[in-house]
């Protein structure tokens, strides 16, 4: 035996291992038993492959940042990523826009995660407002898909793949590229003036678009997209402007009475990146209008404020300001900052609300008599500059006035109706 052992080559020599005590050996044995008891991952995937999700694409403009995983029952968990407010506990994750890749005919189930937001320092959940998604095979034509509420602030989405690819979004998207294309269609119109006023945190150009004469007797200002996930305001502005530029007798009459100034997309960076609420420096662009804007943290608001101050200095301050948003209710938010002229302001807001009901499908009503949302644009512009204004929310789940799901076309129609609302408002109020 000794002679035989001496003839073993190096590759056949016994493996020498470091000394291990019985506790280490026992733990290794337990770990091996657990691994042997686990189902084979490759077997599990092979069983679900014929109808399984293949990929979720978030690599395009306005796609929402998220990560996903599939549970043992085949449900795909969609983990939305929060954006956070600077020096605040507030966080938000309510935007989703992604592209599913899977086999045609696959029946897929998804559950949205990370819906527990913090709003104004208080815990809350997007789940209570998350009742609808929209889907599209080409990213252009969208149709509604109702969502299912589950216990515990959970929301489920079920769908059958109509083809190998399907876009899913919370609301019909309106991207920076959509804005750029639309502006090009109106840029050469003699009734339009597009003026750069500054840049976003990320260096994107902010513009004020004027429709009508610079010497018009009345001026109305609208801003959309302070919160990136809320595209309804862009569709409304597009509908309003397109109506005013039709050059028919009615549009010409409107533009004899007033000019419209719009900042169509305040939070361009976050829109491009698929974020939910704050700008890239963690600032809420519909807050802190009760004091001067910070040029470093909120250059978007700083640029707008400098434009407003120049308009005031030139004797051309807006007579009315409307801030456009989306939520799950759709109310007109009338804030009540203390100070001179409040009663007159509230009386004018009553006139405005009545005209919305008369000339649009607005039915949702306005906030209560004690309501104040300090620092919003409608509140801050009245408190600091004496400009009448309000925040107009548009319901993302249902339009009660027309008994239909929201869409870009419906919101554009609302914007067209605003053209007459403003005409009658200035004829009644005579600021």
Image: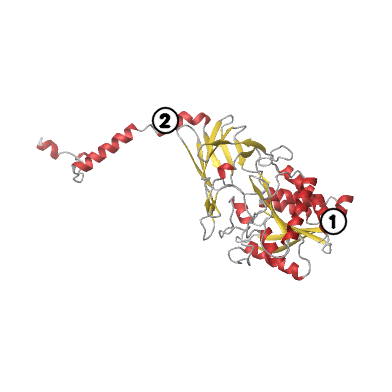
**Residue picked out by circle 1:** 427
Query: In the visual, does 310 lie left or right of 428?
Result: left
Q: Pointer 1 and pointer 2: residues touching (CB < 8 Å)?
A: no
Query: In the visual, does 90 lie left or right of 4?
Result: right
Q: Name above or below for residue 217 compared with residue 103.
A: below
Between 230 and 356, the one lying in front of the other is 356
The answer to whether residue 191 is visible is no
Estimate how packed mark 1 is, as few (under 14), some (14 to 19) or many (20 or more) residues with alpha carbons within 10 Å. Answer: few
Point 25% across, 37% down: residue: 29
Between 268 and 394, the one lying in front of the other is 394
The image quarter containing residue 292 is: bottom right
Horizontal and vertical percent for residue 191?
83, 58
Q: Nearer the viewer, mark 1 or mark 2?
A: 1
Q: Name above or below for residue 29 compared with residue 93.
A: above
Identify the element where label 1 is drawn: helix
Horizontal and vertical percent for residue 198?
67, 64
Horizontal and vertical percent for residue 24?
22, 43
Q: Residue furthest right?
A: 249
Point 54% across, 34% down: residue: 109
Query: In the visual, does 397 lie left or right of 191?
Result: left
- Quadrant occupied by the C terminus: bottom right
Q: Earlier in the sequence, mark 1 or mark 2?
A: 2
Horizontal and vertical percent for residue 200?
63, 61
Indicate which disc residue 147 carries: none
Point 77% across, 61% down: residue: 319
Estimate how packed mark 2 is, as few (under 14), some (14 to 19) or many (20 or more) residues with alpha carbons within 10 Å. Answer: few
Q: CA distance from mark 1 to mark 2?
A: 73 Å
**Residue picked out by circle 2:** 43
- Quadrant occupied by the N terminus: top left
Between 61 and 417, the one lying in front of the other is 417
The image quarter containing residue 32 is: top left
Callout count? 2
């Amino acid at each position: 035996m000794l002679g035989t052992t001496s003839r073993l080559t190096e590759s056949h020599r016994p493996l020498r291992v470091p000394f291990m005590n019985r506790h280490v050996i026992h733990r290794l044995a337990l770990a091996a038993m657990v691994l042997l008891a686990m189902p084979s991952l490759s077997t599990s995937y092979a069983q679900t492959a014929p109808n399984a999700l293949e990929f979720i694409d978030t690599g395009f403009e306005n796609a929402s940042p998220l990560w996903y995983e599939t549970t043992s029952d085949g449900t795909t968990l969609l983990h939305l990523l929060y954006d956070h407010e600077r020096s605040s506990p507030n966080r938000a994750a309510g935007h989703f826009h992604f592209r599913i890749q899977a086999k045609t005919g696959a029946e897929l189930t998804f559950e949205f995660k990370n819906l527990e937001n913090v709003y104004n320092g208080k815990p809350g959940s997007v789940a209570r407002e998350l009742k609808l998604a929209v889907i599209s095979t080409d990213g252009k034509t969208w149709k509604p898909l109702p969502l299912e509420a589950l216990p515990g602030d959970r929301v489920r989405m079920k769908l059958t793949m109509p083809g190998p690819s399907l876009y899913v979004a919370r609301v019909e998207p309106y991207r920076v590229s959509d804005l750029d294309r639309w502006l090009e269609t109106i840029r050469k119109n003699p009734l339009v003036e597009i003026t750069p006023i500054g840049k976003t945190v990320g260096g994107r150009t902010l513009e004020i678009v004027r429709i009508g004469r610079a010497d018009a007797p009345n001026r109305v200002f609208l801003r959309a997209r302070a919160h990136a996930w809320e595209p309804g305001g862009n569709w409304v502005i597009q509908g309003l402007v397109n109506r005013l530029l039709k050059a028919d007798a009615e549009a010409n009459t409107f533009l004899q009475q007033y000019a419209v100034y719009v900042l169509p997309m305040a939070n361009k960076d976050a829109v491009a990146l698929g974020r939910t609420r704050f700008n890239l420096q963690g600032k809420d662009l519909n807050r802190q209008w009760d004091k001067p804007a910070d040029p470093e943290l909120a250059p978007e608001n700083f640029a707008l404020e400098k434009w407003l101050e120049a308009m005031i200095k030139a004797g051309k301050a807006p007579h009315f300001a409307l801030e456009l948003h989306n939520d799950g209710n759709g109310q007109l938010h009338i804030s009540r900052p203390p100070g001179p002229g409040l009663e007159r302001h509230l009386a004018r807001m009553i006139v405005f609300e009545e005209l919305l009901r008369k000339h649009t499908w607005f039915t949702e009503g306005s906030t209560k008599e004690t309501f104040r949302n300090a620092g919003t644009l409608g509140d801050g512009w009245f408190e600091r500059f004496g400009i009448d204004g309000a925040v107009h929310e548009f319901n993302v789940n249902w339009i009660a006035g027309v008994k239909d799901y929201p869409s870009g076309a419906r919101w554009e129609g609302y914007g067209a109706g605003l053209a007459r609302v403003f005409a009658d408002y200035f004829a009644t109020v005579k600021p």
